[in-house]
Image (spheres, rainbow, N blue to C red):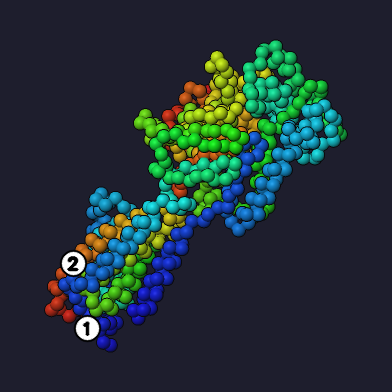
Amino acid sequence: MKRLTCLLLACLTALALTACGAEKPQEISLFAMDTYMTLAAYGDSADDALTAASREINRLEATLSRTIDTSDVSRLNAGETVVVQPETRALLERALTLSGETGGTFDMTVAPLVALWGITSDAPRVPSQEEIDALLPLVGSEHVHMDDAVTLDTGCAVDLGGIAKGYASQQVADILRAHGVTSAVVSLGGNVYVCGSKPDGTPWNVGIQDPAGSGYAAMVSLTDRFAVTSGGYQRYFEAEDGTVYRHILDPRTGRPADSDLLSVTIISDDGTAADAYSTALYVMGEQEAVSFWRAHGGFELILITADGRLLYTPGLSDAITKPEDCAYDFQLLTAQPAA
Amino acid sequence: MKLNARSIALCAVLTALALGLSTLENLFPVTLIVPLPGVKLGLANIVTVFALYELGAVPALTILTARCLLGGLFAGNLSALLFSLLGGFTAMLVMIALKHCKGLSIYGVSIGGAAAHNLGQMAAACITLGNTMVLGYLPFLLAVSLVTGTLTGFVAGLLFRAMRNIRLSH
Amino acid sequence: MTSNSSQPSLRPKPLDALVAAVVIALAVVTALLFYLPKTGSGDQLTLVITVGGQEQSRTPVTQLPDGPVRIEGRGGYTLTLSPSYSDLPFSPEWSVRVSDSDCPGQDCVHTGAISRAGQSIVCLPAQVVISLVGAASDVDAVLG
């Protein structure tokens, strides 16, 4: 009797302790598309899914790269008329649509100016206004001719970098789902995709970096969503005279966007659009961004303004949390302007 | 234990006593002294220990189950049921085993029961929360169980001394 | 039916001490298991430095040296990682940042200080990733 009870006890304790084992994710991290990417997935198929996802990311990088001579994009930029791959065509068309939607605040044809400022290179510089004026006419959707083959006007260039990560996150999402993964979190250099919920069923907690500090400005609980944040604080360079030049250019002026926003976060079901909107709305500034959201809808928005406010859309009311030490003034955006 | 009116009544009284003690201890905010979730004086265990010795394992188990179910209903908190049942049953199993050790007094059995009670509650917490974060409290709860077990044993001992001349269950 | 009531010994006996000792031992063991720093299952905030995809170091922040740390990245770039302790209101007590780097973009320096699990500083040219990890992280991913 005593032995049986002891055995029972041992089993009970063992059972209790195994019930407490937390599931560990499969993780992959890589450098791609000019940024650092981490992917973590749970479940039996996580391993295969992640391998497939990283292969896809590398493939996309090669396809969309501006530096690999044989990619469609490079050949277009070199002046060739290219019969592009269906995927590239679809992306180019999407970029043109997004450009139209956002009134040109997102524009893939801003590439020549990006090169002028040396933003993604090792030597950023401040060009003169004449240099900017010379290249500004090259910006615009009208310079992209989408016939059976695609041509760009002379001197023009496209850079799909503004939607590449968003599109990649969309592809990764499809791959994860195709492999039956129901719980994963992916960060492609700040383009975040959360698949399903955490293994314990609770939503994923995504923190939004405080543009002005080291903590979080806000936290959002998300399931099955894409989230992208753009802000001038992410990349910038200081000129010799101390002026700070931020890396997000306004395609309409050819200069770094002079925005009253510190950061824009888009939460949506469309990864590609989220990527483009986050840059576009940053360029637009608070008023235009809010009008855009009111007119368009279809996504959730968090704006952090230079004067210390954090504006968020009603769809996030239940999901957003203000951290303890956050100094921002949280304000709800309304669908209609206050009368 | 014979299943007659007298013994059933005895069990009922003990159950009521256990419930009363349980309600009483909820009035003491023990968490002010020991800031751990789930720390209790374990007063109801006095009845459990007493019943175990006086009536045997099965009646004691029955009283325990009844006390947990009714206690959950009265407190309006059925979700805590998993905690009290797992804790109670684990404690019971350990005490039944320890009872067979001739070398142990009521104190040893009570301490063992109190510690097992905490283990069971921990397991319930891990299952409910789905993670192991709460295990951090376990060392402290176990240390506290030394005290609560001794206390329970002491009071149950007083009860036995008082009852020495009264035959309860035949 | 024989009664199965038995009188327990009401005075403490020597073997009781054994039971108490077992409980104490159990408490000590669970304390060690849970509170000792261990890779992968510790509760502590840990600084992880990765160079070129290879993990170079993984140290609980409480065991880090007080002064700056030099990190040799790929491409010949060197970063200097500096911890700082702050008692300004609204800011975490301990944080770490890249105080100096000879990389071209200076993104790592511009990232500023990190203090929470889940945050990281990345230097692409040097292929250096400095991140804070810990089981008790309040976020699963960081935007921005």
Q: Is residue A238 left or right of residue A94?
A: left
Question: In the displayed structure, would residue B2 be above or below residue C133?
Answer: below
Query: Which residue is disc 2 drawn over?
Result: B155
The circle on residue A270 is none
Closer to the camera in the image, A304 or B19: A304
Subunit bearing disc 2 = B
Residue A30, image x, y percentages: 62, 43
Q: Pointer 1 indicates a residue of which chain?
A: B
Amino acid type for the residue under numbered disc 1: His
Taking the spot 44% from the left edge, 47% from the top edge, the residue there is C136
Mark 1, residue position? B170
Whether pointer 2 and pointer 1 mark residues with C-beta atoms closer than 8 Å, the reply is: no
The Cα–Cα distance between marks 2 and 1, rounded to whole angstroms, is 24 Å
Residue A167 in the figure: left or right of residue A10: right
Q: Is residue A325 visible?
A: no
Res. B105 image quadrant: bottom left
- Hey, what amino acid is under mark 2? Val
Please tell me which residue is depicted at 39% across the width and 75% down the height of the picture. Answer: A7
Which residue lies at the image location 32% right of the left edge and 68% below the top edge?
B91
Residue A173 in the image: above or below residue A138: below
Residue at 20% from the left image edge and 69% from the top image edge: B156
What residue occupies the far top of the structure in this picture?
Answer: A130
Say few, some or many: other residues with alpha carbon within 10 Å of mark 1 (under 14 / 14 to 19 / 20 or more): some
Q: Can you name the residue that lies furthest to the front here?
A: C76
Q: In front: A103, or A327?
A: A327
Left or right of B155 in this view: A208: right
Q: Earlier in the sequence, mark 2 or mark 1?
A: 2
* Residue C70 in the figure: left or right of residue C53: left
State the image coordinates of residue A63 (x, y, percent, origin top left).
Answer: 75, 38
| Quadrant, the N terminus of chain A | bottom left
